[in-house]
Amino acid sequence: MKLKIKKIKNLSNKIGAYPFVEVRWLDIEGDDGWSTLDVLAKEKLPVAVSKGYLLSQEKGVTRLFRDYIENKEKDTMEDIGSTVIIPSSVIVSIKKLNL
């Protein structure tokens, strides 16, 4: 489940420093409508899928970003966007993707 990444002591602005990954994780399921106890007892958690650059995975938290502003130098970035923070305890799998 845990993808082995180097511990990041100093954050890099090089996009190549961060692996592009697919994270499958258990999401919360809720319903405000009427139901029965039998239906609720059979409900399962949905598996959500997030893809992005893996910033870190430590202290029970997995951090991803999906977008970045490209710097004038190729392969470097200024800012990041579309960030996701996932509790590591709900992660089903993480796999590295090739770009």
Image: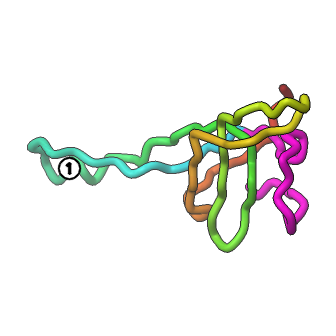
Quadrant location of the N terminus?
bottom right
Q: Is residue 60 above or below residue 14?
A: below
Which residue occupies 77% across, 31% down?
A: 70
The residue at which mark 1 appears reads as 38
Q: Which amino acid is tagged 1?
A: Asp
Q: In the visual, does 49 lie left or right of 7?
A: left
> Magenta span: helix, strand or loop, mainly?
loop
Q: Quadrant of residue 3?
A: bottom right
The answer to if 27 sits in the magenta stretch is no
Q: In the visual, does 70 lie left or right of 23?
A: right
Q: In the visual, does 18 lie left or right of 54?
A: right
Among all residues in the image, which is located at the extreme bottom?
59
Among all residues in the image, which is located at the extreme front?
72
Position in image of residue 97 (x %, y %): 81, 33
Quadrant location of the C terminus?
top right
Which residue occupies 61% across, 43% down?
A: 24
Considering the numbered disc 1 on the image, is that residue within a helix, a strand or a loop? helix
Residue placed most toward the observer, 47 or 58: 58
The segment highlighted magenta reads 1-21
Here the colouring is: rainbow
Q: How many marks?
A: 1
Q: Quadrant of residue 8?
A: bottom right
The answer to if 2 sits in the magenta stretch is yes
Which residue occupies 63% across, 51% down?
A: 92
